[in-house]
Image (spheres, rainbow, N blue to C red):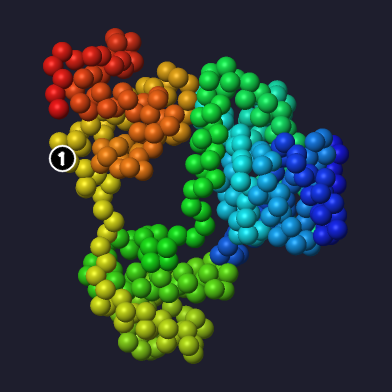
């Protein structure tokens, strides 16, 4: 395996100059997020032509990637969602054209395969899983670490070529690029800090002022963690938040009575900020998020299960990953006639959307075929 290590701006600029105008390149990242709020980029792997380059993000100016990412060159990745998030945070941008081999595999009947299983099924090559929990921030990296990291991009071109051939025969290649673009533009990164309380176990069971206090304190904790780039639990534990919500303290002494609160956590300005968050929370009415089908007409709610069953049948019949075809939220969006509904546009409308419209209008119904499979049948008495 031809591997080059890059840890200077000069060498990175040389590589990027050679890549100008290239048709495609393969990319992967290694990162940690256990000790920080934001993902900490530890390594970038790139395959260009037949060479593999391991780039040390600690030692180079990551803004240099901007031109490559903005270019028309196709970036081939596997399971790209986290890579895109990490690159956007660390580099300030991410590739504008992508081909995700995991998504592509879903369109030929595989269900979110790992890279190693995809390499085995497509190329009949077995690769070592390596040490999944290795410390990628350690320098220097060992030879085994470098080899393992390079393997993540070594076979991506061959996998892409294999899948594109099959997808072209199935006339689904355009669908894959559409799905990859959906992933590329999907919002990523931290969610709204005001929603952080929903991730605290047992917080949804709180009521009245206690729920408002939990929401306000969680929001304060989230913003504090973001500013310091540390995990929220290092600012304040979930247990402490629930304890504070129950007690609703008005002083530092009362704060210390809450289970999970330590004196070192509430000294000086921090304690005052925390008490201010408690006071804000007391006056805020916080509602639980709506149940998904709350705003769907009662007459249409039974259709959700029916449509879900038909979509599963279509996924099985056409050998496509059901999660790509659509989610419960997609069905609900269609029933609400949402203009952003994915089932009424593009390849999904072609495969399933029109069938659903016929079911909803009464022009078609579902029946078993006697062998455990569903089939769509025209009805004699369509209704509106």
Query: Residue 256's x, y, as percent?
Result: 40, 83
Residue nearer the viewer, 82 or 26: 26
Q: Which residue is rendered at x = 31% and y = 23% of the image?
A: 355
Q: Tell me the residue at 58%/69% (across/down).
A: 229
- Image spot of residue 30 (x, y percent): 68, 51
Q: How many marks?
A: 1
Q: Is residue 243 above or below residue 306?
A: below
Residue 332 visible here: no
Q: Is residue 134 above or below residue 195?
A: above
Q: Quadrant of residue 299?
A: top left
Q: Which residue is mark 1?
A: 298
**In the rendered image, which quarter is residue 297 located in?**
top left
Percent x, y of residue 221:
45, 72
Residue at x 78% of width, y 44% of height: 19
x and y percentages locating residue 74 in the rendered image: 66, 39
User: In the visual, does 4 lie left or right of 315?
Assistant: right
Quadrant for the N terminus, please.
top right
Q: In the figure, is residue 313 to the left or right of 111?
A: left
Q: Is residue 320 visible to us here? A: yes
The structure residue drawn at horizontal position 53% and vertical position 69%, both measured from the top left corner, is 226
């Amino acid at each position: 395996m031809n591997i080059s290590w890059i840890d200077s701006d000069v060498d990175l600029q040389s590589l990027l100059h050679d890549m100008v105008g290239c048709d495609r390149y393969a990319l992967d990242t290694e990162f940690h997020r256990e000790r920080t709020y934001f993902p900490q980029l530890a390594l970038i792997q790139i395959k260009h032509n037949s060479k593999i380059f391991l780039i040390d993000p600690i030692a180079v100016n990551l803004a240099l990637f901007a031109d490559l990412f903005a270019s028309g060159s196709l970036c081939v990745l596997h399971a790209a969602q986290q890579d895109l998030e990490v690159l956007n945070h660390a580099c300030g941008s991410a590739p504008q054209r992508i081909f995700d081999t995991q998504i592509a595999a879903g369109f030929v009947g595989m269900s979110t395969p790992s890279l190693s299983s995809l390499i085995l099924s497509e190329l009949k090559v077995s690769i070592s899983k390596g040490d999944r929990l290795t410390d990628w921030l350690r320098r220097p990296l060992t030879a085994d670490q470098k080899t393992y990291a390079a393997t993540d991009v070594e076979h991506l071109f061959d996998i892409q070529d294999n899948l594109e051939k099959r997808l072209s025969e199935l006339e689904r290649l355009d669908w894959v690029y559409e799905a990859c673009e959906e992933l590329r533009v999907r919002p990523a990164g931290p969610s709204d800090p005001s929603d952080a309380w929903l991730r605290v176990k047992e917080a949804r069971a709180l009521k009245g002022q206690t729920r408002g206090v939990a929401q306000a304190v969680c929001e304060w904790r989230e913003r504090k963690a973001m500013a310091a780039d540390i995990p929220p639990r290092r600012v304040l534990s979930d247990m402490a938040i629930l304890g504070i919500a129950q007690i609703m303290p008005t002083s530092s002494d009362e704060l210390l009575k809450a289970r999970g609160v330590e004196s070192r956590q509430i000294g000086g300005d921090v304690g005052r900020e925390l008490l201010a968050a408690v006071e804000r929370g007391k006056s805020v009415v916080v509602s639980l998020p709506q149940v998904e089908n709350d705003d769907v007409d009662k007459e249409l709610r039974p259709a959700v299960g029916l449509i879900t069953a038909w979509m599963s049948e279509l996924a099985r019949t056409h050998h496509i990953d059901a999660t790509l075809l659509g989610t419960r939220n997609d069905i609900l969006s269609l029933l609400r006639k949402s203009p952003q509904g994915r089932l009424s546009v593009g390849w999904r409308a072609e495969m399933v959307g029109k069938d659903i419209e016929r079911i909803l209008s009464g022009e078609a119904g579902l029946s078993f075929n006697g062998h455990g499979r569903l089939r769509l049948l025209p009805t004699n008495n369509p209704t509106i």
